[in-house]
Image (spheres, grey):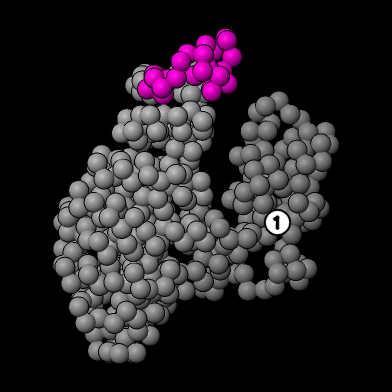
């Protein structure tokens, strides 16, 4: 923070800079900071600072105490300037020094820095009005594009949708403009059985960024529109796949669309492909969220088993983030309720080793789901699976769960699984296999 020296004889004393000097010396990066016609004086500084919170502010406007823009700057006898409320709090704590220089104050009075306040207000006014103008320009362009979409077809429609998608992503107020002027119904009407993927991709890219009303939801859950989304989920770009997944999830979260409406085999196949694209974590997360939501349907669980998704999910479990891992385990736990699902889990050589590694490593929820799956598998074939689990270090992990602060249900399930694993061994051999100490025994 530059130290300003008071100038004598400048309107009211204690003012440290005039506007001309500040602009001339480049403190504000150039001229044009005073709004014409006195408009700046009508704007509320607090509101402007809050609206422009992410903008880079000149350091001369920053209070050294809070590191926030000053709204009521005052200057001490040392020449340092602070936000009034911050320096008053400093004094209330018993300090008699300047916070920046740590000089002892020979005069405890504070002087309003009116010139700096004017500079701050003028700078924020210019930025605020420019932002508002850009926002109004973008909103006007959005209205023009909506009008264009009613008239054009083919590539002209694709171009208009692409630009509208850009302006909607650019400014949150533009979303309201589109929603309030029939944009939802118009864009939804563009989706259908004869819609090209180029149009569908751009339209869905817009819809996922808008707040869908009840009418739009009812329109979008029509079979022909859902079929288009599923087709693009399977054949579109990664960005399109993610947007289709997000839109279907949004529709599923509403009251107008049940899981049975979208529970087709093609959808499950498309989601599995998306989940396996490791280089796109957002797609993995979106795909797993939707797959979890769909697992309430027996048809979906049977599809997961029939297309061979179980070993593929088990294989990539170690690559998932904690959030994705919980979703994937929920899906596997759901399919373990099916007899074919349990067989598929048992037949996958990575099921037991990968699940044992997850116990007590990520979260209690993950531990609970992993235990549930292990229990289903081991109970299906105790002799085969129990020995494999013991070799993978399951017993030691189960003892950790039992001795931890986990919930009683989890501890009980761990004890039951430990007992199941021990049935195929004598006590001595079991302890040896598990490499347990006599203390643990």
Note whether residue 245 is visible. Answer: no
Please count the marks in the image.
Answer: 1
Q: Residue at x 20, y 48 (%)?
A: 298
427 and 160: which one is in front? Answer: 427
Q: Is residue 282 magenta?
A: no
Point out residue 253 in the picture as x, y percentages from the top left corner: 25, 52
The picture places residue 79, in percent across and down from the top left corner, at 79, 47
Residue 440 colored in magenta in the image: yes
What percent of the width, then of the height, locates residue 70? 62, 50
Please indicate whether residue 80 sits to the left or right of residue 191 in the image: right
At 41% across and 53% down in the image, what residue appears? 312
In the image, residue 233 above or below residue 427: below
Above or below for 169 versus 318: below
Query: Can the viewer see residue 346 in this picture?
Result: yes
Residue 415: name its quadrant: top left
Relative to 227, residue 357 above or below: above
Is 142 left, or right, of 338 in this rendering? right
SS of the residue under disc 1: helix
For disc 1, the neighbor class at 10 Å (few under 14, some 14 to 19, many from 20) is some
Which of 109/240 is in front?
240
Q: Which of the 4 image quarters holds residue 343?
A: top left
Is residue 440 found left or right of 366 in the rendered image? right
- Magenta residues (range): 418-441
Measuring 29% from the left and 71% from the top, which residue is drawn there? 231
Residue at position x 51%, y 49% from top?
319
Residue 425 image offset from top left, x and y in percent: 44, 19
Residue holding disc 1 = 59
């Amino acid at each position: 923070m530059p130290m300003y020296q008071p100038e004598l004889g400048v309107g009211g004393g204690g003012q440290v800079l005039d506007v001309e000097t500040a602009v001339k010396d480049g403190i504000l990066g150039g001229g044009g900071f005073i709004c014409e016609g006195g408009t700046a004086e009508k704007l509320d500084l607090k509101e402007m600072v809050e609206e422009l919170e992410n903008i880079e502010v000149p350091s001369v406007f920053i209070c050294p105490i809070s590191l926030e823009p000053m709204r009521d700057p005052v200057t001490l006898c040392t020449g340092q300037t602070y936000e009034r409320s911050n320096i008053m709090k400093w004094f209330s704590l018993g300090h008699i020094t300047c916070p920046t220089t740590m000089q002892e104050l020979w005069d405890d009075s504070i002087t309003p820095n009116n010139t700096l306040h004017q500079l701050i207000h003028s700078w924020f006014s210019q930025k605020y009005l420019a932002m508002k103008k850009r926002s109004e320009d973008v909103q006007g362009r959005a209205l023009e594009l909506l009008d264009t979409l009613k008239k054009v077809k083919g590539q002209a429609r694709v171009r208009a949708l692409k630009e509208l998608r850009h302006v909607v992503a650019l400014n949150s107020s533009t979303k309201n403009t589109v929603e309030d002027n029939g944009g939802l119904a118009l864009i939804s009407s563009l989706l259908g059985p004869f819609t090209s993927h180029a149009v569908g991709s751009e339209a869905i890219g817009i819809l996922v960024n808008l707040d869908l009303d009840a009418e739009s939801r009812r329109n979008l859950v029509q079979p022909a529109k859902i079929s288009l989304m599923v087709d693009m989920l399977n054949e579109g770009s990664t960005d399109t796949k993610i947007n289709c997944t997000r839109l279907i999830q949004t529709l599923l979260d509403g009251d107008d669309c049940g899981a049975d409406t979208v529970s087709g085999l093609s959808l499950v196949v498309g989601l599995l492909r998306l989940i396996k694209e490791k280089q796109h974590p957002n797609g993995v997360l979106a795909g797993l969220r939707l797959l979890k939501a769909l697992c309430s349907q027996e048809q979906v669980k049977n599809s997961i088993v029939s297309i061979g998704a179980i070993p593929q999910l088990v294989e990539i479990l170690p690559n998932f983030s904690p959030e994705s891992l919980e979703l994937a385990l929920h899906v596997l736990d759901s399919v373990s309720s099916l007899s074919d699902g349990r067989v598929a889990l048992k037949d996958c050589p990575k099921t037991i080793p990968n699940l044992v590694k997850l116990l007590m490593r990520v979260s209690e929820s993950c531990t609970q789901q992993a235990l549930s799956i292990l229990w289903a598998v081991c109970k299906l074939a105790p002799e085969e699976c129990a020995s494999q689990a013991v070799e993978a270090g399951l017993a030691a992990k189960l003892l950790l769960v039992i001795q931890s602060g986990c919930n009683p249900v989890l501890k009980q399930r761990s004890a039951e699984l430990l007992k199941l694993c021990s049935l195929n061994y004598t006590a001595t051999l079991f302890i040896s296999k598990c490499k347990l100490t006599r203390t643990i025994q």
